[in-house]
């Protein structure tokens, strides 16, 4: 029997080892994939110098998150109200005085950061105490971030800072120093929405008798945060305890003096170590990608807004150029040719703006596809265009015989023909812009659906009026009188 039991034990150990190896390999693969994905995001931004000038903060954040992945940086952010001992807790974890502490309200004015030098040391459990130091994670390093108190002055700015740090951080320490207040509960609830691991640290337990601290701990666990955190996510600590020491005074009397004691943070270190050992790299990869995706979305939105404004300017300039050319030209055939030339030029200009390589042949093919999808709209516009063009040609040709009287009818007809052609060109521009903004793709709905949606939302009356107004300012009537 012992032999069989030993075999089962060996198989079990072997199975656990295999699972551990598989988990390690999977974690490494996921981490490498995360790095590769973020590199591609940064490399594929395709921003012009003008677009970069308005996106420096977002671009720095993206590069920062990439560096975080490249160098395996674990960030631990500490939140809490003023006077809860956040900075002293970080100093205790570091084993040296780095973060400013003090009794003055609002002492931590900005976010501070410090590298935590991790040493490889086995966790040793004694009879009644645990001695522990955080181990290094290969080439990784840990950054501790101390944030201003959640109840400090200029709360709106502080809340934004807290929100941004919370989204960057891989682990959040929320520090309290007694029963949780309403403000603390609200802040903890908001931080929970960031979907990050949170450890609630009940600090300054040295200030309470044992029975009282246990009662407060139980109340926090069972009533205050039961819906937010589990028991495993709550830990007690004393980051800067004070101990009474008897000292003899000059007059020979003995008085008690409070002196700094040894921080009681071993339980917190163990909790942090458990999180990092269990899911350190996975946390970094997931949080970096989630945060980078959010920043990338803002960058893309900003880029597309800038490009859309420039695209709209290109479209409108093309529309007016075409309208003027048609209005002043008395020959119908040339009207048709100039319309096609200007539309193709507009498509090529838009393709350059959106970084899509397109030849003149490709632009003509796209114009044909758009015209085909526009169907009846294009056909009707073409017939009106031809009819008005023919009438305009006739009036222009009869000007000498009528002593220029026919030109009084020529001008409104020319403007109407130009406006009709302009509406069609405007629609073609909008459709082209949408196509190129989607990366030269019509999307899952196909070209007809895109064209239909744009045409249905196109206010032709408004566009006609706008074109006519601008034409009246651009067309030199005296020049028209010489036709």
Image (tube, rainbow, N blue to C red):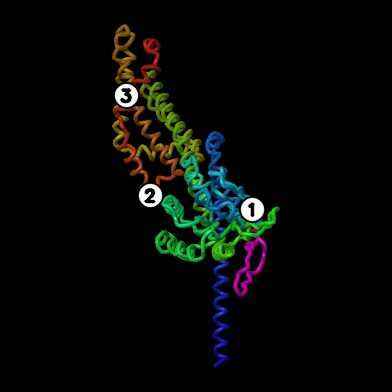
The quadrant of the picture occupied by the N terminus is bottom right
Q: Looking at the image, is 202 positioned above or below residue 14?
A: above
Chain-order first, disc 2 or disc 1: 1
Frontmost of labels 2 and 1 is 1
Q: Is residue 31 left or right of residue 225?
A: right
Image position, residue 26 (x, y; %): 55, 65
Q: Nearer the viewer, residue 275 or 184?
A: 184
Say which residue label 3 marks: 465
Say which residue label 2 marks: 444
Gap in Å between the C-alphas at discs 2 and 1? 48 Å
Please report the bounds of the magenta region as a residue range.
Answer: 117-140
Image position, residue 312 (x, y; %): 42, 31
| Residue at horizontal 32 percent and vertical 26 percent from the top | 464
Q: Looking at the image, is 88 positioned above or below residue 462?
A: below
Image position, residue 25 (x, y; %): 57, 67
**Callout 1: 10 Å neighbours few (<14), some, many (20+)?**
some
| Element marked by disc 2 | loop
């Amino acid at each position: 029997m012992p032999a069989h039991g030993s075999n089962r034990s060996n198989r079990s150990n072997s199975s656990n080892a295999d699972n551990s190896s598989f988990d390690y390999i999977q974690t490494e693969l996921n981490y490498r994939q995360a790095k590769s994905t973020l590199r591609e995001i940064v490399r594929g931004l395709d921003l012009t110098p003008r677009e970069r000038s308005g996106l420096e903060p977002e671009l720095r954040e993206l590069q920062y998150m990439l560096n975080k992945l490249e160098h395996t940086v674990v960030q631990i952010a500490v939140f809490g109200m003023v006077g809860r001992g956040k900075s002293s807790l970080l100093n205790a974890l570091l084993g040296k005085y780095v973060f400013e502490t003090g009794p003055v309200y609002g002492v931590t004015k900005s976010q501070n950061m410090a590298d935590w030098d991790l040493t490889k040391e086995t966790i040793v459990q004694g009879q009644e105490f645990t001695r522990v130091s955080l181990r290094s994670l290969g080439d990784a390093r840990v950054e501790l971030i101390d944030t201003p108190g959640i109840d400090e002055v200029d709360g709106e700015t502080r809340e934004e800072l807290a929100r941004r740090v919370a989204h960057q951080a891989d682990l959040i320490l929320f520090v309290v120093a007694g029963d949780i207040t309403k403000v603390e509960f609200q802040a903890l609830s908001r931080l929970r929405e960031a979907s990050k691991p949170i450890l609630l640290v009940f600090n300054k337990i040295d200030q309470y008798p044992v029975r009282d601290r246990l009662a407060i701990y139980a109340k926090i666990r069972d009533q205050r945060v039961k819906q937010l955190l589990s028991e495993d996510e709550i830990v007690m600590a004393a980051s800067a305890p004070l101990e009474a020491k008897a000292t003899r005074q000059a007059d020979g009397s003995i008085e008690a003096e409070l002196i700094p004691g040894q921080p009681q943070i071993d339980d917190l270190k163990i909790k942090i170590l458990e999180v990092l050992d269990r899911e350190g790299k996975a946390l970094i990869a997931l949080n970096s990608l989630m945060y980078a995706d959010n920043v990338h979305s803002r960058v893309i939105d900003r880029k597309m807004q800038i490009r859309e404004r420039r695209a709209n300017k290109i479209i409108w300039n093309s529309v007016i150029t075409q309208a003027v050319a048609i209005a002043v030209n008395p020959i119908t055939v040339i009207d048709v040719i100039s319309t096609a030339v200007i539309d193709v030029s507009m498509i090529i200009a838009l393709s350059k703006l959106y970084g899509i390589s397109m030849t003149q042949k490709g632009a003509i093919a796209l114009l044909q596809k758009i015209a085909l999808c526009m169907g009846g709209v294009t056909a009707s516009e073409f017939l009106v265009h031809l009819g008005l063009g023919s009438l305009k040609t006739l009036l222009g040709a009869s000007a000498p015989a009528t002593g220029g009287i026919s030109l009084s009818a020529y001008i409104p007809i020319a403007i109407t023909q130009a406006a009709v052609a302009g509406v069609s060109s405007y629609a073609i521009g909008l459709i082209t812009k949408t196509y190129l903004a989607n990366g030269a793709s019509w999307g899952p709905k196909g070209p007809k659906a895109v064209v239909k949606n744009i045409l249905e939302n196109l206010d032709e009356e408004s566009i006609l009026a706008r074109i006519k107004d601008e034409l009246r300012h651009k067309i030199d009537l005296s020049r028209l009188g010489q036709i």
